[in-house]
């Protein structure tokens, strides 16, 4: 059984740029959630995707957007990057959103 | 909106000492409760979970947690810690949102546990 994978591992961008992060779900899972973990904090819920549609959103602006594909993999897109977007971005997959399994994360640094 | 409070930000224990990490949550409905662990350089891993039934739940690596509904608490315990338990521990609550099919995890700020030899 393959766990949740994320790419890339690390990423450095400058303010104003756009970034795309990718996530592959664990086998058998149909729901993907994205979280932002700032240094020294717990993960914060960004949004959840189910059946290729956004199915719940946290307190993040519209420049955070996502996609879910038919194979349940997912992308997180962030436009107009700001310094405060520097964080570890975590993807979690689950079956119908209950018990969530996390990937290793993508460390984004915005300069 | 739900929230999770972890009272201990940094705990230092000697090997073989007993551990109890506090977690309180705020949510009016039915919740599922979790403890996750993040070892240095590794991803978040599930330690244990409570959905329903026996309020004392046992997880991996000798950890257990007790759900006390009247106190909105879900404290994590281990009778004897090991050096390898050094990690960050997060309490989380899972609640339904929006249409009832979506759910999100709300995390506490975490407790950094340092176990010394």
Image (cartoon, helix red, strand yellow):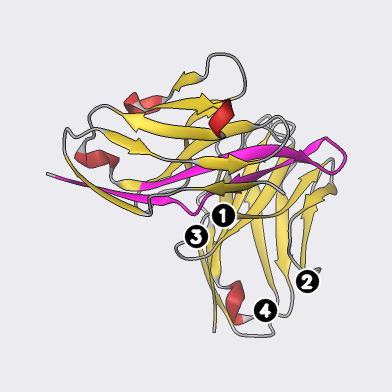
Q: Is residue A33 left or right of residue A6?
A: right
- Asked if badge 2 and badge 1 are on a common chain, one would say yes
Residue highlighted by disc 2: A63
Q: Please state which of the two labelled residues, at mark 2 or mark 1, is closer to the viewer.
A: 1
Residue highlighted by disc 1: A43
Q: Which chain does the numbered disc 2 sit on? A: A
Label 2 secondary element: loop
Q: Is residue B25 left or right of residue B74?
A: right
Q: Is residue B93 visible?
A: yes
- Asked if badge 4 and badge 3 are on a common chain, one would say yes
Q: Please state which of the two labelled residues, at mark 2 or mark 3, is closer to the viewer.
A: 3
Q: Decide: marks 1, 3 in contact (CB < 8 A)?
A: yes
What is the C-alpha distance between the residues marked 4 and 3?
A: 20 Å
Label 1 secondary element: loop
Residue highlighted by disc 4: A81
Label 4 secondary element: loop
Residue highlighted by disc 3: A41
Q: Earlier in the sequence, mark 2 or mark 1?
A: 1
| Direction left: furthest residue | B117
Range drawn in magenta: B88-116
Query: Looking at the figure, which quarter contains the C terminus of chain A?
Result: bottom right
Q: Residue drawn at (68%, 32%), measured in percent from left and top?
A: A98
């Amino acid at each position: 059984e393959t766990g949740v994978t994320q790419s890339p591992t690390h990423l450095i961008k400058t303010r104003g740029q756009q970034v795309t992060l990718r996530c592959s779900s664990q086998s058998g899972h149909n729901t993907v959630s994205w979280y932002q973990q700032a240094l020294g904090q717990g993960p914060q819920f960004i949004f959840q995707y189910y059946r290729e549609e956004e199915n719940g959103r946290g307190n993040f602006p519209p420049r955070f957007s996502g996609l879910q594909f038919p194979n349940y993999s997912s992308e997180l897109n962030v436009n107009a990057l700001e310094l405060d977007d520097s964080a570890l971005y975590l993807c979690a997959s689950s079956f119908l959103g209950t018990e969530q399994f996390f990937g290793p994360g993508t460390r984004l640094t915005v300069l | 909106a739900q929230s999770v409070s972890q009272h201990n930000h940094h705990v230092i224990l000697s090997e073989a000492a007993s551990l109890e990490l506090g977690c309180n949550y705020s949510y009016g409905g039915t919740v599922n409760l979790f403890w996750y662990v993040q070892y240095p350089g590794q991803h978040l891993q599930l330690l244990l979970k409570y959905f329903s039934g026996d309020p004392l739940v046992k997880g991996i690596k000798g950890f257990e947690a007790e759900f006390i509904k009247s106190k909105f608490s879900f404290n994590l315990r281990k009778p004897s810690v090991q050096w390898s338990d050094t990690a960050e521990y997060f309490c989380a609550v899972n609640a339904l949102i929006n249409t009832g099919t979506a759910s999100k995890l709300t995390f506490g700020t975490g407790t950094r546990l340092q176990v010394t030899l």
